Image (tube, rainbow, N blue to C red):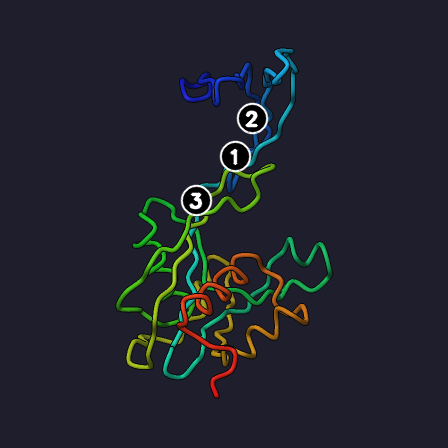
């Protein structure tokens, strides 16, 4: 274990051991944990944790047109679950060695072909805290046609084949209600722009 693994967290949790089960795209580890319950008793736990780093996502919106930019691509875990891996979602990707702002600007241009002038981080949220260490930095950014630098579509060498969707905001929200949008980060960001008054459900 490294020094970070030996640290007690919240005063009641101590890592006693770590076994690396897989180290490929990310690292899957099994931890042995001593947990002190509120009544003072010790409980020994086993927890498997997947660490693949943090990520970022962005919803591009156009207030004047009342439109948003979404993407559609095959997501293999979704395919395993429902035999249809084409997921509609906001532009997103891993931070790798970059900061969140730099990473999301790069992802926006690669995936959507749009280079926004300004991006705003609204939150950094854990995506699946029961098993995954990832925190996702959520951004919004306004766009216009003048910001388009290319077709988007993602990177071939990363296995990406991304369709870029420019949708009226009311249609995007209707897609949440009927199940066509079932991605958590996308739901959060679509609702956020409504709360901020950046897009509206009833433009009339």
Which element carries disc 3, helix, strand or loop? loop
Q: CA distance from mark 1 to mark 2?
A: 7 Å
Among the two numbered marks 3 and 2 on one chain, the one whose residue lies closer to the N terminus = 2
Which residue does the numbered mark 2 point to in the structure image? 20
Q: Between residues 133 and 13, which one lies in front from this camera angle? A: 13
Q: Residues within 10 Å of mark 3 (few under 14, many from 20)?
A: many
Q: Between residues 81 and 144, which one lies in front from this camera angle? A: 144
Q: Are marks 3 and 2 in contact (CB under 8 Å)?
A: no
Q: Between residues 137 and 190, which one lies in front from this camera angle? A: 190
Residue 181 in percent (x, y) is at 61, 67
Which residue does the numbered mark 3 point to in the structure image? 54
Picture residue at 40% right of the left edge, 84% below the top: 65
The disc placed on residue 27 is 1
Residue 67 in percent (x, y) is at 45, 79
The image shows residue 24, relative to residue 81, as above or below, that is: above
Question: Which residue reaches farthest right?
Answer: 82
Q: CA distance from mark 3 to mark 2?
A: 19 Å
Looking at the rendering, which quadrant does residue 69 occupy? bottom left
Which element carries disc 1, helix, strand or loop? strand
């Amino acid at each position: 274990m490294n020094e970070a693994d030996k640290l007690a967290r919240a005063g009641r949790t101590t890592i006693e051991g770590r076994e690396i089960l897989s180290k490929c795209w990310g690292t899957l580890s099994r931890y042995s944990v001593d947990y002190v319950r509120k009544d003072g008793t010790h409980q020994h736990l086993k927890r498997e944790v997947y660490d693949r780093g943090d990520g970022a996502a962005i919803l591009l919106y156009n207030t004047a047109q009342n439109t948003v930019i979404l993407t559609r691509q095959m997501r293999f875990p979704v395919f395993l679950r429902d035999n249809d891996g084409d997921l509609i979602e906001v532009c997103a990707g891993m931070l790798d060695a970059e900061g969140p702002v730099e990473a999301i600007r790069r992802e926006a241009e690669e995936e959507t072909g749009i280079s926004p002038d300004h991006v705003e981080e609204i939150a950094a949220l854990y995506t699946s805290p029961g098993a995954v260490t990832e925190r996702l930095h959520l951004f919004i950014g306004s766009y216009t046609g003048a910001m388009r630098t290319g077709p988007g579509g993602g990177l071939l060498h990363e296995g990406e084949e991304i369709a870029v969707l420019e949708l009226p905001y009311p249609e995007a929200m209707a897609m949440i209600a009927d199940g066509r949008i079932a991605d958590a980060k996308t739901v959060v960001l679509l609702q956020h722009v409504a709360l901020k008054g950046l897009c509206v459900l009833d433009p009339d």
